[in-house]
Image (cartoon, rainbow, N blue to C red):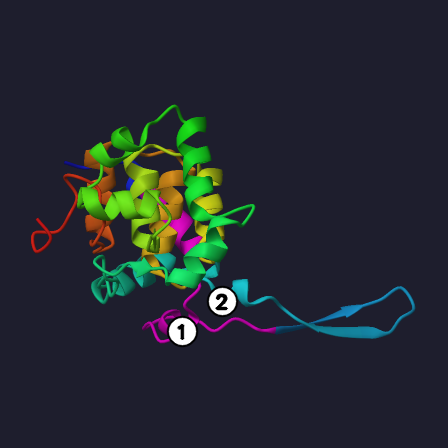
Amino acid sequence: MSFGFIDDLNEYFCEKYADYDKICILKGYVMPKMHATERRADGRDYSYTLPASTMRLAAQAKKAELLAELKEKMFDPSFSFSFRPLGFFTRIRDKFKKVNFRKTLEAVLSRNSLTKEEALSGLALDPWIWEQICKGKYYPTKNLVFSLALSAHLPSADMHEMLDVCDLALDYTSVKDVVISYLVEKRIFNADMVRAALEEYKLKNLFVKGLESEDEA
């Protein structure tokens, strides 16, 4: 099945992806000028460094060919089975924080009219682990926050809020972060479309029911 939105995803990826070590070694990549000179009103020349974003694929004349080459080398290095249990004293301190993941999760679910049970129903996750996360005994991985955003159809702001309280953030040098950012930002939650996007960029290791990899099933 072909989806037209993949072209839009590719454009978004070219604009956002920022692993310059992988981009710059692509065959046919043209290194842009990183310095420019501008003449001021007083007649003096002012030299300045251009932002690193000028190195992204979006600025390349042959971005489609370069992206195709990059996709051939893609693989998902992330793991989905590692959680962060909080130590006893850390858990006590976290309990009395004005903002922590447990309170943030409760607020996010409430805003989206979801119960903890309803949120879990879309996740391929052990109920015991989910309960520990909801109680604030475990902190989620980035993969789990991504999975919850996709399965519960959460707004992008809610995903960012949950990442932030866990001291996590989107990393645009990560293929997965760019693709998930696109899906959530554009509110693309249809299972077939999500699966197509993940397959296009060779991504796996998510906790969304129906999207988990074979070795996780």
Mark 1 Cα-neighbour bin, 10 Å: few <14, some 14–19, many ≥20: some
**Residue visible at 38% across and 58% down in the picture:** 63
Name which of mark 2 and mark 1 comes first in the sequence. Answer: 1
Q: Does the magenta stretch include residue 32?
A: yes
Residue 3 in view (yes/no)? no
Return the residue at label 2: 55
Tell me residue 56's x, y (percent). Answer: 46, 62
**Which percent across, then down, holds residue 195?**
20, 42
Residue 90's spot in the image, x, y percent?
Answer: 44, 61
Which residue is painted at 60% across and 66% down in the image? 51
The stretch of residues the image draws in magenta is 7-34
- 128 and 3: which is toward the camera: 128
The answer to whether 21 appears left or right of 151 in the picture is: right
The answer to whether mark 2 and mark 1 are in CB contact below 8 A is: yes
**Magenta span contains residue 66:** no
Spatial CA span between label 2 and label 1 = 8 Å
- Please tell me how many numbered marks the rendered image carries: 2
The image quarter containing residue 176 is bottom left
Q: What element carries label 2?
A: helix
Image location (x, y in percent) of residue 177: 37, 54
Picture quarter with the N terminus = top left
Instruction: Tell me the residue that label 1 is attached to.
Output: 24
The image quadrant that residue 211 belongs to is top left
Give the residue displayed 29% in from the left and 64% down from the top: 70
The kind of residue on which mark 1 rests is: Cys
Q: Which residue lies furthest to the top in this view?
A: 113
Mark 2 nearby-residue class (10 Å; few <14, some 14–19, many ≥20): many
